[in-house]
Image (cartoon, helix red, strand yellow):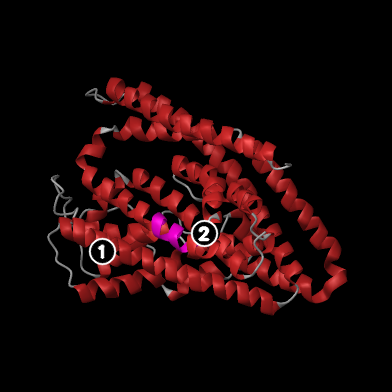
Amino acid sequence: MSTSPHTSHSKHQTLYIAIALITGIIVGELLNLTLHDLSHPNTALNQILSFFTALTDIFLRLIKMIIAPLVFSTLVVGMAKMGNIQTVGRIGLKAMLWFFSASFFSLLLGMLLVNVFEPGHALHIALPEIGATTGLPPTQPTLTNLVAHLFPKSIVEAMATNDILQIVVFSMFFGLACAAIGDLAKPVVMLLDSLTHIMLKMTGYIMHYAPVAIFASMASVVAVQGIGILLAYGSFIGEFYLGLFLLCTALTGVGFIFLKIRVFSLLRHIREPMLLAFGTASSESAYPKLLQQLERFGCDEKVCGLVLPLGYSFNLDGSMMYMTFAVLFIAQAYGIDMALSDQLFMLLVLLFTSKGVAGVPRASLIVIAATLSQFNIPEAGLLLLLGIDQILDMGRSATNVFGNSIAASLVSKWEKALR
């Protein structure tokens, strides 16, 4: 019965977040209707938007503040408790096999849906000039970039920039070293175990502010774009969200095969982190709460400590689907017909290049831009998506959280460590 206060609080928090989402949409549309359509630049709207941005930014900064110490402490403690490199290798291998399988399925499902729905052909707006610039940084997903993002030259720099993948690599070496020297490392492991609990307690405090951040985030998006943009891009947005729903349904189906009826309990546990990721358009914002909820569901803390940080770099199922959706949508919009062999080759390219920009801001768009140029599709087509990227990002962030929840639960089950 000790979990009931948590469950009750989680229900209330989920309700507050849902109310904040709806209220944000309503307030945003009212601002859009009353202030946005004036012929001259409106300073009142800009001031309101900057206030909303500040409210959201406070929350995201508070979350980012605890991610690095949380990833480091949970991973090191988990590795030290596992005790040997064979266990770590086995769990890591199971996780990576799942990540690549789920990523490939996400890409393939996106490709099939775009070919069936053809949203690019249904778009009735002016196309950007082929030479137009997208304003994205010229980062090419290469092996050199992957190495640079994988191996830290300074753990302090990695923590300062919140580069999860680099923190994971350092933590794995640190954790294995702790396990290897045994009793001598016990004080450090106990200290880091305490740090984990302190960080999760801080998460509880920060979560009280989440509804405010989500209200502000939604209101600012809708105030700028208006509900009207949903009409112009209605079919594309609707088809993409249908794709995300089908992806989540398929992942739930796989979860049901292994977890049986408990998969529905998992869905109840992760609804708050998913709503959080949806409202802020950031899967990162849900990380601390997701870790907490998965452990409450019964996942092994050692497995979560390893699988979740890796998943945030290698298992972004919603983002993977978005990449195929976006590339083929832009190709269709410009009347470029890609052969099936080219599309399948593109899937393989995306499967690996997407792993090479982990930790790069707006990584999905950078990978898409690189893929467009590789297949001679105008990069300017990205401008078609920049206006609705936030709306799409909300769905793919929530799906990323969902995919990582399934991954952590399945690996816990396969390790016979699911309580």
Q: Residue at x 69, y 72 (%)?
A: 173
Q: Which residue is mark 2?
A: 406
115 vs 312, left or right, is: left
Q: Nearer the viewer, residue 238 or 360?
A: 238
Q: Nearer the viewer, residue 29 or 295?
A: 295
Q: Badges 1 and 2: C-beta atoms under 8 Å apart?
A: no
Label 1, secondary structure: give it: helix
For the residue marked with disc 2, what is the amino acid?
Answer: Ile
* Residue 84 found in image quarter: bottom right
Q: Which residue is mark 1?
A: 112
Q: Which residues are magenta?
A: 248-255
Quarter of the picture containing the C terminus is bottom right
Taking the view exactly as shown, the residue that stands out farthest to the bottom is 86
Q: Main secondary structure of the magenta part?
A: helix
Q: Residue at x 37, y 21 (%)?
A: 44
390 vs 63, left or right, is: left
